[in-house]
Amino acid sequence: MILVVDFGGQYNQLIARRVRDLNVYCELVPFHKALAAAKEKKPTGLIFTGGPSSVYEDQAPQIEAEIFQLGIPILGLCYGMQLIASSLGGRVTRAEFKEFGKTSLDHTGHPLFKDVSQPTQVWMSHADRVAALPEGFTAIASTANCPLAAIADDQRKIYGFQFHAEVNHSLEGRQMLRNFVFDICGEEASWTMANYAKTAIDQVRAQVGDGQVLLGLSGGVDSSVVAALLSKAIGPRLTCIFVDHGLMRKNEGDEVEAAFKDSGMHFIRIDAEDRFLARLAGVTDPEAKRKAIGDEFIRVFEEVGKEIKSVDFLAQGTIYPDVIESGWGDSAVIKSHHNVGGLPDVIEFRGLVEPLRLLFKDEVRKLGKELGLPDYLTNRQPFPGPGLAIRIIGDITKAKLDILREADAIFRSELEASGFQEADQYFAVLTNTQSVGVMGDYRTYDYTLALRSVSTSDFMTADWSRIPYDILDKVSTRIINEVPGINRVVYDITSKPPATIEWE
Ligand code: XMP
């Protein structure tokens, strides 16, 4: 495995994902635990990430010097390279010219640049630079403003890139990481989801023994993949509770049921549409909707819990970014309990089963395919817990939900059929604006439907999708013709920020 040492930079998870994409296992570890983790886990290589600090500041994250004596190859990126330089006797100063953006890099043909063009484009983002090399190091690449853009000590196998090899704007960055991981660290490409599935199934069997496991299934990718994995591992000793709140997209509830009902597990679908709609009647404020839905979920689970009383284990779809973001394991349990909407409060259990704890989202999707889940589950885009309730502006009725489901299904199927690739989340929103139209010889006074589509990598920021007009035209025509109750279709061209992805 490769250990990625986190110094707080924004691309840290991306580095780990790049290494995993090479079919090599890696983990992220915070810098202050790096030495202990390196001794315990014995990685074949270490990658020091970037970070927002300057190495010469008082509070800047440092690394124990002993890590350089372990004989493990190290690659430092940006702050990681500056830290290597300053820790080993070099000098880091504020750069005369800040470098930010795409930059042309000349390299010496060092093995780290095997199969990399000369020059090549890299992505720079730094205000500090290495001004003097530590003993034993040579420069192996430069840019116009940065004579020490990559450095190497081949004796000790310690290297640094001032640029961010992990981002797409570094056009051949993946090749450079590949060279480090395979040629310098001697890794093998053996981390595949087929291997993972086998190991995870064995681990679950060992953990659970002949115990009973309960899983709250939402139909989202993570809980669906946990369900598939556990049903392979323990079959009938798994009970899945799927609460259908009636706020799902077209056919979604039936699709989830179809995927699991014959899989050997104990599958309970609770049809709770009526009670959720009753609870939501007259609720128009977005946060009040969320709260009402969350409360109702807990009530449903409490009722089920009274019948189940106790299980041995509770399964959860916690994934690696949840583990990282919740503070490296210590608080992960608290956060993930919250994910299952109150289950732990009413049902006694001995422990948690979290078979996706080590996986990134794209790996979860691959694992789902490996386990034989249908594409409509593994490729599912993010869908908010409160469902269509927050995509209907104002009050929610069954009639409005049906209108929205039809229109949303048309939009999604047409966009998918068109081959348009730059949308990470796309859906329809039923506004509460009614306007005048004319259909045939009749005047109409119907709802306005908004189409929303965004491209994003982290859902924290997003850009609206430039969907070609002819696709939008086809979608609009079909919706107006096929969905009674809508007479106007608009397209949302606002990015996030200032808007959010959802309308509520
Ligand atoms: P916003 O609208 O905040 O959405 O830009 C960012 C991402 O989060 C999803 N989202 C939710 N997911 N419960 C959820 O489980 C919610 O209440 C919720 N609100 C927004 C949204 O779909 C997008 O992917």
Image: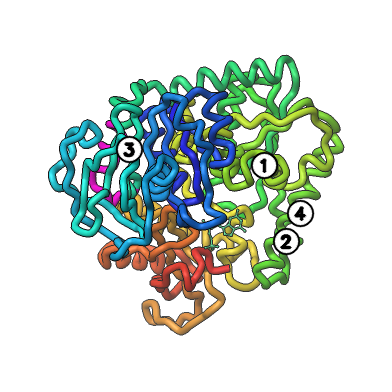
Image mark for residue 291: 2
Q: Nearer the viewer, residue 455 or 58?
A: 58
Q: Is residue 351 magenta?
A: no
Residue 388 located left or right of residue 288: left
Question: Which is more foreground, mark 1 or mark 2?
Answer: 1
Residue 389 lies, with reference to residue 198, above or below; the image says below
Q: Give the number of marks.
A: 4
Q: Amino acid at mark 2?
A: Lys
Q: Amino acid at mark 1?
A: Ala
Q: CA distance from mark 1 to mark 3?
A: 43 Å
Q: Amino acid at mark 3?
A: Glu
| Residue at image mark 3 | 135
Which quadrant holds the N terminus? top left
Residue 439 lies, with reference to residue 306, above or below; the image says below
Image mark for residue 296: 4
Q: Amino acid at mark 4?
A: Glu
Q: CA distance from mark 1 to mark 2?
A: 23 Å
Q: Nearer the viewer, residue 193 or 451?
A: 193
Say whether marks 1 and 2 touch (CB < 8 Å): no
Residue 70 located left or right of residue 401: left
Say whether marks 4 and 2 touch (CB < 8 Å): no
Within 8 Å of ligand 1, the CB of disc 2? Answer: no
Disc 1 crowd, CA 10 A, few/some/many (<14, 14-19, 20+) = some
Provide the residue span drawn in magenta. 167-179
Which quadrant holds the C terminus? bottom right
Callout 3: helix, strand or loop?
loop
Callout 2: helix, strand or loop?
helix
Q: Nearer the viewer, residue 64 or 421?
A: 64
Question: Which is more foreground, mark 4 or mark 3?
Answer: 3
Question: Which is more foreground, mark 1 or mark 4?
Answer: 1
| Residue at image mark 1 | 332
Callout 4: helix, strand or loop?
helix
